[in-house]
Image (cartoon, rainbow, N blue to C red):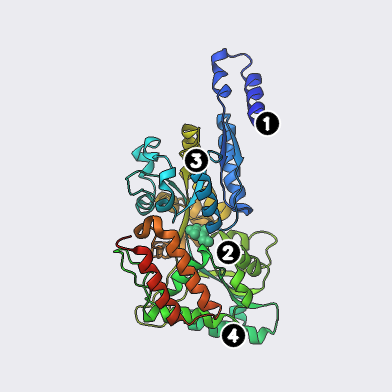
């Protein structure tokens, strides 16, 4: 509340000589609670820009803090919305949540003109459109899985960046043996059983031409030889180029290891780029990025899971109008350009990619555009309100394989049965 008073007093002073009517809007100043992610520079950027809006409008913004992982955040919001809680007004939602949570969000077409909506990638607008036709979220940033590597170490040992997963393993083993540094890890990624593992395992399978778990037409495709091969390949890293502790790694654990110079390769999202190259990073200037490697079966290709975050308005909030105004500012082309430059997040407005400042200061994001456009989507749209159960079964199956508890063949055969049960007569 303190800021509300500060704004009120501020406008009383500033408006000293003005008619009383010009002070009135501040008397209606509201407090908007917003979720901005789980900490670090991305959250700081989000809060900074939210506060710019507060300063312009006289409203107040308060951060609603959430757990780290996307899965844990989802659990929290499901509980809050079941209780019709209005504690949070503007909710940052994962790209896989619209089908799970849309009933709790307001229709943004009532707040935004078509011209505004038209600026964003149509595929994300489509993704954020509920089965009942309402637009429930505005794209904040998009995301895709990438391979990061230590340019200096690859060069030192005479290696080109890997084209296939086999290349990656071979290069990592060679560098590990030659460096003889016991703190150095070959390849770090996300191995904890949560949504992050769903993202990693989907891109392994897709890179081997093994499909996307459940296809857009609803077919459960995951039990196939290419998918088996993909999971076997990932399992072969654990205990060789990847330490067993990977089974507890999320994005930030991998980034921490890579940024402190302790990993040769890392799978992560674009946000890790700005951090890896910031002042004080031990790998500043030594980081290369490229699409994730291909598999070695027929139909293999570079892949990367499509991620991203969006802003929605909680239906139980009392401040729909002000929340919409805040979202308009936070997702504007101007803020997205700064967001790309300062914290290396991918814009959701096509036009931002051709801004001269973007090309000059963030060529990394511009050059990887093709990768982002070719990314593989999780089967969230087709499985709708069952997506979280599907993802949960999938990450558990992948986890069973990488932790050596089950063979890929058994895990995928069981998964197929479970998904068939979850599907029932239709998704
Ligand atoms: C990133 C992605 C998001 C994904 C999450 C998994 O935040 O943007 O879509 O679900 O990682 O950990």
Secondary element type, mark 3: loop
x and y percent of residue 172 in the render?
58, 82
Q: CA distance from mark 1 to mark 4?
A: 57 Å
What number of labels is visible? 4
Q: Tell me the tag on residue 173.
A: 4
Q: Which residue is mark 1?
A: 2
- CA separation in Å, label 2 and label 1: 35 Å
Whether residue 18 is visible here, answered yes or no, is yes
Corner quadrant of residue 25: top right
Answer with mark 2 or mark 1, whichever residue precedes in sequence: 1
Question: Which dot, 1 or 3, sits closer to the camera?
Answer: 3
The answer to which of marks 1 and 3 sits earlier in the sequence is 1
Disc 4: residue Cβ within 8 A of ligand 1's nearest atom:
no
Provide residue 218's location: percent of width, then percent of height: 31, 64
Circle 2 is placed at which residue position? 251
Within-10-Å neighbours for mark 3: few <14, some 14–19, many 20+: some
- Few, some or many residues within 10 Å of mark 4 (<14, 14–19, 20+): some
């Amino acid at each position: 509340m303190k800021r509300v008073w500060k704004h009120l007093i501020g406008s009383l002073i500033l408006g000293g000589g003005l008619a009383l009517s010009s002070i009135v809007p501040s008397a209606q100043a509201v407090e908007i609670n917003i979720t901005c992610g789980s900490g670090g520079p991305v959250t700081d950027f989000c809060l900074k820009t939210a506060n710019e809006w507060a300063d312009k409008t006289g409203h107040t913004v308060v951060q609603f803090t959430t757990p780290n992982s996307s899965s844990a955040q989802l659990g929290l919001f499901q509980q809050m919305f079941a209780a019709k809680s209005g504690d949070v007004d503007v909710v940052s939602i994962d790209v896989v949540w619209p089908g799970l949570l849309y009933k709790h969000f307001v229709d943004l077409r009532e707040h935004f003109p078509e011209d505004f909506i038209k600026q964003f990638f149509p595929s994300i607008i489509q993704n954020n459109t509920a089965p009942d036709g309402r637009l429930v979220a505005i794209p904040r940033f998009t995301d895709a899985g990438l391979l990061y590597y230590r340019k200096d170490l690859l060069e030192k040992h005479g290696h080109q960046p890997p084209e296939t997963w086999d290349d990656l393993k071979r290069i990592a083993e060679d560098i590990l043996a030659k460096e003889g540094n016991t703190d150095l890890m070959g390849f770090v990624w996300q191995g904890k059983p949560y949504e992050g593992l769903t993202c990693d395992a989907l891109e392994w399978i897709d890179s081997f031409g093994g499909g996307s778990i459940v296809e857009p037409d609803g077919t459960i495709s995951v039990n196939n030889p290419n998918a088996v091969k993909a999971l076997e390949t990932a399992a072969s890293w654990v205990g060789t180029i990847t330490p067993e502790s990977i089974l507890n790694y999320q994005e930030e654990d991998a980034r921490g290891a890579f940024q402190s110079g302790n990993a040769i390769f890392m799978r992560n999202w674009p946000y890790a780029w700005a951090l890896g190259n910031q002042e004080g990073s031990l790998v500043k200037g030594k980081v290369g990025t490229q699409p994730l490697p291909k598999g070695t079966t027929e139909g293999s290709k570079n892949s990367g899971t499509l991620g991203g975050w969006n802003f929605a308005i909680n239906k139980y909030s009392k401040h729909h109008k002000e929340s919409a105004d805040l979202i308009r500012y936070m997702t504007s082309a101007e803020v997205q350009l700064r967001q790309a430059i300062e914290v290396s997040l991918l814009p959701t407005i096509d036009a931002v990619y051709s801004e001269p400042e973007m090309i000059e200061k963030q060529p990394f994001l511009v050059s990887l555009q093709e990768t982002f456009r070719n990314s593989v989507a999780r089967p969230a749209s087709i499985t709708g309100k069952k997506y979280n159960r599907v993802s949960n079964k999938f990450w558990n199956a992948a986890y069973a394989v990488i932790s050596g508890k089950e063979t890929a063949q058994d895990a995928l055969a069981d998964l197929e049965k479970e998904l068939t049960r979850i599907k029932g007569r239709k998704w």
